[in-house]
Image (cartoon, rainbow, N blue to C red):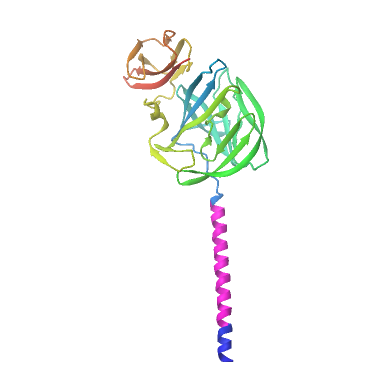
Amino acid sequence: MHNAKRRTVRVHYKMNDMRIIFLTLLFGLTIMKMVGQNAVPFPMTNVNWTMDKITVSMSNPPETSHMYSYYKTNGDTILNGKTYTKIFKETGLYCFLREEDALVYCKYNDGPWIDTTEFILYDFSLNVGDTVQLPLLDFSLNYYPGVVEYVDSIMIGSTKRKIITVSSWITFDFVEGVGSLQGLLYPEIPWVDWGGELTCFSINDTIFRTDGSGNINIGNCWQTINVNDLKINNLLVFPNPFNDCIEITGIEMKRVMVYSLTGKLIYESSERNNDLDFLKKGTYILRIIDRNDSQIDMKLIKE
């Protein structure tokens, strides 16, 4: 009888141990799941994006053209009592972003050609089956309906991010803490004969692959075209891309030069308005020397 009692006690202890182990594992899995679901904030400091707009012509055979746009964060500003991050393109100050409750809002810079009303750029609280109005820019904001087809995760660097696939007239993939895999400001993509791709995403001089591999490289997206970062906030080169002439404003400049991508000097002037109609279609490097002999290099596209 004494031995039977001891065996019964041992079994009882073992069952309690199993319950403890099971509850510990369950608690651990719950914590892991909760951690995995933590939202990744949208980056607002030292961030660069490169977007490739791919257009396929209706000619026979069709011709494919690429137009790259570069975006970077450049400090904060307060508009109507709200704090925004300033977004610069290669031509200067372009728009403003802010995040609130898993929503990323966008407001374009004041100008006569685009609607400057704040709109929702990304909504990372969406679930499968939700409907969404996608903003698309064509001189003014238009909205197209979309439906969330998938919600999954993707590895960016060492962090898993939520990825939301929205099906509309095309398919968009929105990634937490990154933006759209079709480009940061996907509303700028033409609505016909187009393709869009986020070709580079970097934070603090680290380039993060957005293919789910988790790979990273040293560098930033502005370096992918081998030109210097914008150094003067008020510089504006307009239009860019251009057809014939460009105008340079916002700084006191001494000289402007245009180089080929191989480094050959093609054009030089000291004027703010420059007729470059003679250039062939393609990508060039525009070099501006300011009154302090500082050098600013930027990409210039002839359409």
Residue 210 in the figure: left or right of residue 101: left
Q: Position of residue 108 (x, y in %)?
A: 56, 26
Q: Residue 254 appears at what percent x and percent y? A: 34, 14
Residue 17: % across, % down: 55, 73
| 154, above or below 58, in the image | below
User: Quick one: quadrant of the N terminus?
Assistant: bottom right
Q: Quadrant of residue 24?
A: bottom right
Q: Is residue 25 magenta?
A: yes
Residue at the (57%, 36%) spot, across then down: 173
Which residue is outermost to the bottom?
1
Q: How many marks?
A: 0
Q: Is residue 280 above or below residue 1?
A: above
Q: Is residue 130 left or right of residue 202?
A: right
Tell me if residue 13 comes above or below residue 299 in the rendering.
below
Q: Main secondary structure of the magenta part?
A: helix
Q: Which residues are magenta?
A: 9-35
State the image coordinates of residue 179 (x, y, percent, origin top left).
Answer: 53, 35
Q: Residue lying farthest front? A: 61
